[in-house]
Image: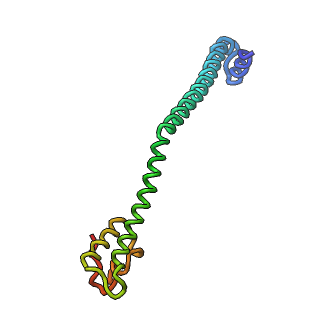
Amino acid sequence: MLTAFVVRQLLKLGLSRAGADRSAPWVAGLLIFALLGAILGILLHLYVRGEIKNHENAAAARVAPAHAEAAGERAADTIHQAKQEEQAHDAIQSSGPDTLPAPAAVAHNCNRLRRAGIVESRLPAPCRPGGGDGTQAAARP
């Protein structure tokens, strides 16, 4: 049946009847071979994709505890940084509105806040350029 189909197609291409009869089994064999190759390729792809998925799931299961631990550490770091920022703000502003702490203490605490990544708008007034009476603003590192 496949051979008859191939013979008809070869005749349409202009091959003689004798040539089509001789080459039809070879062409049909090549078509079957190509079809089997395609099927094998698809099956191989599906197998490899499943193996990759299994490997990814196993890797995710191995690193899940580390991700949980890292999340806990990030939370602890955030809390610690917020406490340090609050302490620095308190140290700068604790002496009241009329008197500021020593300029060296203000400069030190301003530098601590800048190293912690605090943006300029969140810095206390003495740390900003022109803040306080202008003498307390620390030099930028």
Q: Quadrant of the C terminus?
A: bottom left
Q: Is residue 60 above or below residue 77?
A: above
Q: Residue at x 29, y 76 (%)?
A: 106
Quarter holding residue 91: bottom left
Q: Residue at x 37, y 70 (%)?
A: 87
- Please state if 93 lies on the left or on the right of 39 as rendered: left
Q: Is residue 45 above or below residue 105?
A: above
Q: Position of residue 71 (x, y in %)?
A: 47, 51
- Count of numbered marks: 0
Q: Residue at x 31, y 86 (%)?
A: 99
Front residue (pair 133, 85)? 85
Quarter holding residue 118: bottom left
Front residue (pair 69, 35)? 69
Quarter holding residue 54: top right
Q: Is residue 31 above or below residue 57?
A: above
Q: Position of residue 36 (x, y in %)?
A: 62, 20
Q: Position of residue 20 (x, y in %)?
A: 68, 15
Q: What kind of colouring is applied to the model shown?
A: rainbow
Front residue (pair 39, 135)? 135
Q: Position of residue 55 (x, y in %)?
A: 51, 32
- Please state if 15 lies on the left or on the right of 104 as rendered: right
Q: Residue at x 57, y 30 (%)?
A: 50
